[in-house]
Amino acid sequence: MKRSVFIRLLFHLTVAMIVITLLVGTLVYRYTNSMLKEEVLGSNTELLDQSRKIVEQAFGEVQQMASSLALNTDVQKSVWLPWNLEEEYRFLKNTGDLFSTRINSSNYIDSIYLYSAVNKKLISSSGITDIADFLYADHLSKFLEGRTTSAWEAANAASAERSDTVISFYFSVPIQSVKKQGALQINLKEDVLYNAVVNTNKRKLGNVAILNPEGQVLSYKDKSMLLTRFNQTDMERIQREKVGYFVEEIHGEPTLVSFMTSSFNGWIYLTLNPYDEVFKRSKDVIHLTIFISLFVLVLGVLMMVVVSRNYYKPVKKMVMALASNRENPLQDMQGKDEFGFIGESINRLFHENEEFKAKFRSQELILQDHVLVNLLSGKTTDEKDMLRQLEYYGLDLNPEHFMVLVLRVHLEAASITESGEQERNLIYFQIRSICEQAMAGFGKGVYVSQFHRHDVIIMNTGNEPDHSHAFEKAKELALRMISAVSEQMDDVVMTVGIGGKYKKLTEIALSYNEAAEALLYEQVAGQGSILSLHDLELNRSNRNRFIAYRQQVEKLIAELKTGNLDKALAQKDEMITQLNNDSQFGFSYKHMILTHLLNGLVAVRVELVQRGGGPDDEERHWYADFAKLQSPEDVQHWFGELIRNTASELQDKRENKNAEVIEKLTAYIRAHFREPLSLQMLADLVFMNSNYLSKVFKEVTGKTFIDYLTEIRFEEACRLLDNTDKNINEIAELTGFGQKQNVIRTFKKMTGLTPTEYRNRSSLDRLRIEN
């Protein structure tokens, strides 16, 4: 036996602890990581939204400034009128001064230019510039060629003096003109704009970068981090999702990029945060979680070891106790653990105990049945020994005053299927249960199954001084059992025979013999009766009289079978009159004799009229009508009608017997006339003499067997000649004539024509009918 329970238990618990620790750690890490990430992303989104609003507010102010400048009179003149610098043009000076005033009033406007298409020049706060020398000439030309009246652009002003990144706003002058005669360009210096507008709250996490829809950097604190555009995949995601985040590798460092796209001008606002720095707290949490989980795991394993050892001690003691108390050790337990050994040992002990109990109970039941069988058989002579056995086996019987009931059970054929004996045993078991339940209200008693093919009840009658009271009590029990069985079980009829009342145990066999003898009269009284020799007051004189009446019934039935109706009726009248005038013959016996007569008439009808089988519905009605008769006159008249009707059916049967036989034979001839048939063959079929059959055939049909067979074959030959093109040889074979000469001979005899002449004449007759 392997000591594996302790190790296996520790292994299972350890695995469970590891799984639980990993599961809890994973859940804690995922929750903390998600919470911190949501916090960072929420802060970034808030920062981006604030930056977007501030920038768009600043851009809105610039657009309003551009609108007001475009409506200024001097600006309009500068666009529409040609410039002659030799003359005095105050509107040019006023325009330059206006631009200077607006630049000085703003923190982030770098310069303002007005382009005149008429003059191909630009005017600003610093003077007039030719378009060819203008730093932003390409961007300006692109706007003038476009159809929009305003636009934001980002450009690099690269010259010998400086190289700045500006954000420009272009505005058409005049505003509603289809053809652009001029344009305002307001330049915002990117770094000034970023510090004055975008980066207003440095305490926020990270700084904001601004990109145009193509991914070019417009504004950021450190452009060296964003010298190149984001890759195409990232830009497609930004343009598709509008708001979100992703992790991008920038200069070899994983960076968390949060983005938001402006609906104002399509610019993209970004925050860039080092991924490791942002989620440093999350990593600290997971490290702490792993440390705590490992500590709890080690502590749990130590506790399991201590606790398991303590719980293993009683298991070990039990195994040792079982092993030491067994004489024959279990040979197949070498590969099993302690619990398997304990379970197998307990199962072995349990089965041994159950086997012993079963053997003991079976022996007790056999001995108990043996005691009851001895009582019923009369093989016991020592009453004290029988009393001792009754007490030992706990039989529910008092030592004195007994009466025996014998039960005869009738099962209808329909109630027993092919399962046979098993179903029959179940039916008898159910009957026993019903009877024992009925016995519970009548004092003490025992039920014995299948003693001499009958079930037997031994019951105590009590200290009744009069035998009549004991018989009434037994009758009541019998009636209750019969009623209960008929109510609960269909197609089951039970007859009960009651023996005499006796005092001693050794006299039980006498009561049983009387009950079994009473059952002999069931054929007269009928099934479902309660029979008792004491109740019928059966003595020798009554026995002789009963036998005499039965002989009269048998004589009446014999006269009826031989066709002597008058003698049968006379015998009936004599017997019933004698019964009515016999004052010493009890009513029960008179009823038994009349029932015996009815059973005899039913048997005659079944045997001679129906030729086998059992009673039909009409004969069942006979028993019901017999029970309704009220007076001796009704009985005598009813039996007379019954005998006459039976005699009439018998006579009809005799007269129609030959006709029925011949009818069956003629049907056989019509079905098999094509085959070789002979009179002897038909006689063998009906078990009759051939000469007698020939005579009967002639009497019933008016023809001899040969003439009848020839006529049927001739009719079939005529049909074939009329309706088919078959030749004479084929017709001879199909009709049973066998040879062609037989067909020709028969047609000559029947019609005077040959078969060919018959066919031709039939054809001519059909043509005449058609014409």
Image (cartoon, grey):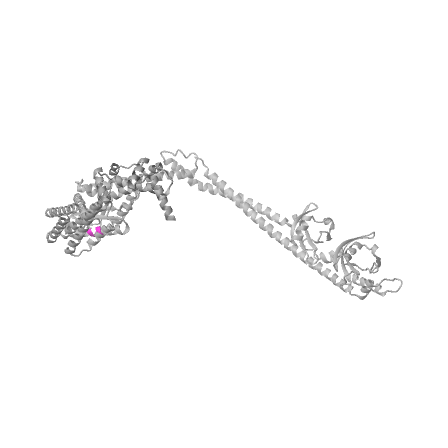
Q: Is residue 285 left or right of residue 664?
A: right
Q: Residue at x 35, y 41 (%)?
A: 759
The N terminus appears in which quarter of the rendering?
Answer: top left
Q: Quadrant of residue 252?
A: top right
- Image spot of residue 56 (x, y percent): 71, 59
Front residue of 688/425: it is: 688
- Image spot of residue 390 (x, y percent): 22, 44
Front residue of 742/197: it is: 742
Residue 455 in view, yes or no: no
Front residue of 742/9: it is: 742
Residue 477 on the magenta span: yes
Residue 733 in view, yes or no: yes
- Image spot of residue 308 (x, y percent): 47, 42
- Image spot of residue 96 (x, y percent): 82, 62
View extreme (right): residue: 86
Span of residues in magenta: 475-479
Q: Is residue 261 left or right of residue 759?
A: right
Q: Residue at x 78, y 56 (%)?
A: 140
